Amino acid sequence: MLKVAVLVSGRGSNLQALIDVCAQADFPAEIVTVISNIPDVFALERAAQADIATTVVNHKEFADREAFETALQAAIVQSGAELICLAGFMRILTAGFVNRWRDRLVNIHPSLLPAFKGLHVHEQALEAGVKVSGCTVHFVVPDMDSGPIIVQESVPVLPSDDADALAARILESEHRCYPQALRLIAEGRVEVVGERTAIKEPAK
Ligand code: GAR
């Protein structure tokens, strides 16, 4: 069983998708801790409901990013996690932290990267007039919203869409893609080759 730490900052619907898939018999990963940088978010409640240990590492209580990340690192190491999944975690991580977890730190982003990085992703997509958007699960590298892509799924952009409608449709796809990516990683089927991944066939 691959031990996973999930880092959150908010509502935690992607966390829920991961909790649900980990509850399936034979799923090869387990969530050992959920860590939030913001107190009292709904994601923490979801974790508690599932009997998963939670920790708040409130970035506001630390003098700088390094001090915050030292506490974050300590909480993760203490949990025994071997993989970190960022699930709506809205703090930028330093290169030092990211490099320490190289190829063991995964993020989900609500666009088809490399299109539409950063914030206001759906507004960016509507502004560009794209007819498809989607989501991306990728390994994290120091450059924001970059790194080897593990799973992507496309989602249509409809003429009537506003940012909320598009976000909701993409979120449904996120809830399929993140569990799928976690399974691939936990089954040892994701190989990082330079700046890309190669997905291996399942073991017979
Ligand atoms: C998700 O749409 C996720 O892709 C996005 O935040 C949302 C979190 O929702 N993440 C980012 O934009 C990261 N750059 P959730 O808390 O319900 O999982």
Image (tube, helix red, strand yellow):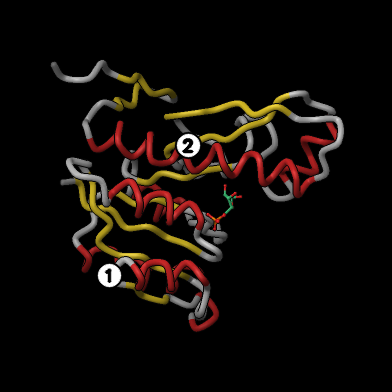
Q: Residue furthest bottom?
A: 61
Q: Identify residue type, mark 2.
A: Val
Give the left or right position of residue 183, taking residue 128 as reference: left
Mark 2 neighbour density, 10 Å: few (under 14) some (14–19) many (20 or more):
many
Out of 58 and 156, give the one closest to the viewer: 156
Quarter where residue 144 is shown: top right
Vertical comparison of 167 with 190: above or below: below
Residue 161 at what x, y percent from top left?
82, 38
Out of 183 and 90, give the one closest to the viewer: 183
- Residue 51 tag number: 1
Vertical comparison of 40 with 42: above or below: below
Q: Identify residue type, mark 1.
A: Asp
Quarter where residue 127 is shown: top right
* Residue at screen point 60% across, 26% down: 154
**Tally of numbered tags:** 2
Q: Quadrant of the C terminus?
A: top left
Give the left or right position of residue 33, taking residue 197 as reference: left
Residue 114 at what x, y percent from top left?
62, 30
Vertical comparison of 67 with 180: above or below: below
* Residue at screen point 41% across, 44% down: 106
Instruction: From the image, state whether disc 1 or disc 2 is nearer to you.
Output: 1
Quarter where residue 124 is shown: top right
Question: Mark 1 vs mark 2: which is more N-terminal?
Answer: 1
- Residue 137 tag number: 2
* Residue at screen point 35% across, 51% down: 20
Secondary structure under badge 1? loop
**C-alpha separation, residue under disc 1 versus residue under disc 2:** 26 Å
Residue 50 at what x, y percent from top left?
32, 66
Contact between marks 1 and 2 (CB within 8 A): the answer is: no
Give the left or right position of residue 154, taking residue 174 as reference: right
Secondary structure under badge 2? strand
